[in-house]
Amino acid sequence: MAQPISTQQAPAVLSSRRVAPAIVAGGAALGAAVLLGALALWFHYGTAVFFATIASGISACF
């Protein structure tokens, strides 16, 4: 049987208990940023222009 070259152990993998809350927090921060951006556009351009911009953006995707 082959012997390991080094006796050092591999770095520990982050547990899912630490990764899952970070993913949730990142998603919540991204959602909050999108919501704040939408509200800023709404207040800056007004309701009609805001909805027209969103509609033209959606139609451009399809």
Image (spheres, rainbow, N blue to C red):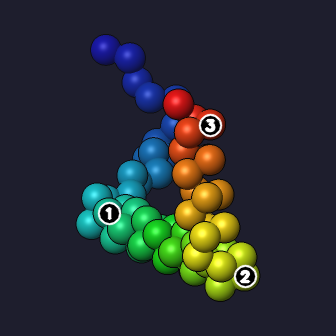
Vertical relation: 3 (above or below) 45: above
- Can you identify the residue that label 3 sits on? 60
> Vertically, is 15 above or below 24?
above
Element marked by disc 1: helix
Amino acid type at circle 2 is His
Front label number (1 vs 3): 3
Mark 1 to mark 2: distance in Å? 36 Å
Q: CA distance from mark 3 to mark 2?
A: 22 Å
The three-letter amino acid code for the residue at tag 3 is Ala
Q: Which residue is mark 2?
A: 44
Furthest residue in direction left, as rendered: 17
Residue 56 in the image: state x and y as whole percent.
62, 47
For this rendering, which residue is in front, 44 or 33?
44
- Above-or-below relation of 39 to 15: below
Residue pointed to by mark 1: 20
Left or right for 35, reference 37: left
Which residue is the extreme one toward the right? 44
Cα–Cα gap, marks 1 and 3: 35 Å
Badges 3 and 2: C-beta atoms under 8 Å apart? Answer: no
